[in-house]
Image (cartoon, rainbow, N blue to C red):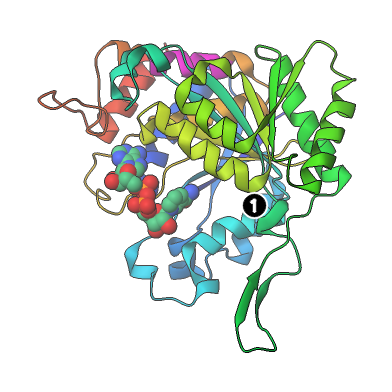
Amino acid sequence: MTHKILVLPGDGIGPEIIAEAVKVIDVLKSRHGLDVELDEAAIGGAGYDAAGHPLPEETLAKARQVDAVLLGAVGGPQYDALERALRPERGLLGIRKELGLFANLRPALLYPELADASTLKREVVEGLDIMIVRELTGGIYFGEPRGICTLENGEREGFNTLVYSEHEIERIARVAYETAMKRGKRLCSVDKANVLEVSELWREVLIRVGREYPEVELDHMYVDNAAMQLVRAPKQFDVIVTTNMFGDILSDAAAMLTGSIGMLPSASLNEKGQGMYEPIHGSAPDIAGQGMANPLATILSVAMLLRHSLGNAELAERVEKAVGAVLRQGLRTADLAKPGESAVGTAAMGDAVVAALG
Ligand code: NAD
């Protein structure tokens, strides 16, 4: 069966890094029997320029029809003055919501060759391999009621609602347990059950779903402790599962343990197994158009796409190994190079990965 992938280059360095990921896909098609069809559409600022909206109807219609979406990045200073609803980032939130992408998988994997790029000591991070499973479409970012009101005494009050229903917790728990089963079979659920009722329910559901996965060792940790443990002894973690806001914060901290924003991919999945795959970094307007962006996070997003939406772990590993190989060869884009070390450009890095694919 031919799988369909929609490519959304977006803004800034988006088109440059996506071009390298597409090179990789083309080689997997021509040399390794990957059966996929690619289509392309506009999102973010590019969507606004093309169709007057950051998530054009045509883009969304195409996204609904495919097995997976591969996104570059969105955003740029030229769009900052637009009204909020038309800003590029709205395109991203919109597509996540419309496709029901409730499970965000963010690995924090340290390549041994890059151990010195981390701000933490080598011995603390060497061998780091964490997967954070973050709930993406619920919790306090979406809960109602929300707003800012004026009280009787004239003072203004801002409020949001942290709400999770059992089914929302259950489905993210399942993704987390399934992920743990494919890895080290250890799951740490992060909550604030000592203070929040919603966390009590979260814990209860995690334990209940866990009965279906007796091989997975479940642990609970309060979010404040988890933040501390992530920088104290991050290697204790295998899979972490948590709510939208806690995951937002912890996954950025975990990403920085690896010291390289240009290296980290992500996946966002819905209940049908459809997914959107993207690097965790933004559109890097400061280096856009200069051919110096690191394409590896986007190429590693292709590996996640192969594994999670196309069920092709073999080719996913091939891509991941090719990335490891180019790092071992000493190739570094500017963001990874140490002072005095020479750097390669975006296209040269992509070409090296293609060559290493075999
Ligand atoms: P950013 O991630 O774009 O850039 C932060 C820093 O990291 C910059 O110095 C940039 O040059 C560098 N960087 C990022 N990716 C890189 C790569 N692949 N190779 C080399 N260096 C890289 O974050 P920002 O500067 O805060 O935001 C810029 C724009 O991106 C904003 O409009 C923001 O809203 C948007 N943004 C988009 C996404 C997304 O599309 N998922 C995520 C975050 C930010």
Q: Which residues are magenta?
A: 315-324
Residue 239 seen by the camera: yes
For image coordinates 68% across by 37% down, the residue present is: 242
Quarter that holds the N terminus? top right
Q: Is residue 198 left or right of residue 286?
A: right
Q: Is residue 259 left or right of residue 247?
A: left
Q: Nearer the viewer, residue 352 or 203?
A: 203
Q: Is residue 340 left or right of residue 130?
A: left
For image coordinates 65% across by 51% down, the residue present is: 63
For image coordinates 47% across by 36% down, the residue present is: 253
Residue 309 seen by the camera: no
Position in image of residue 184 (x %, y %): 65, 11
Q: Nearer the viewer, residue 280 or 71?
A: 280
Position in image of residue 291 (x %, y %): 24, 41
Residue type of the residue flagged with mark 1: Arg
Sort mark 1 into few (<14), some (14-19) or many (20+) by Cα contacts within 10 Å: some
Position in image of residue 285 (x %, y %): 30, 54
Dividing the picture into quarters, in which one does residue 344 lie?
Answer: top left
Residue linked to disc 1: 96
SS assignment for the magenta stretch, majority: helix
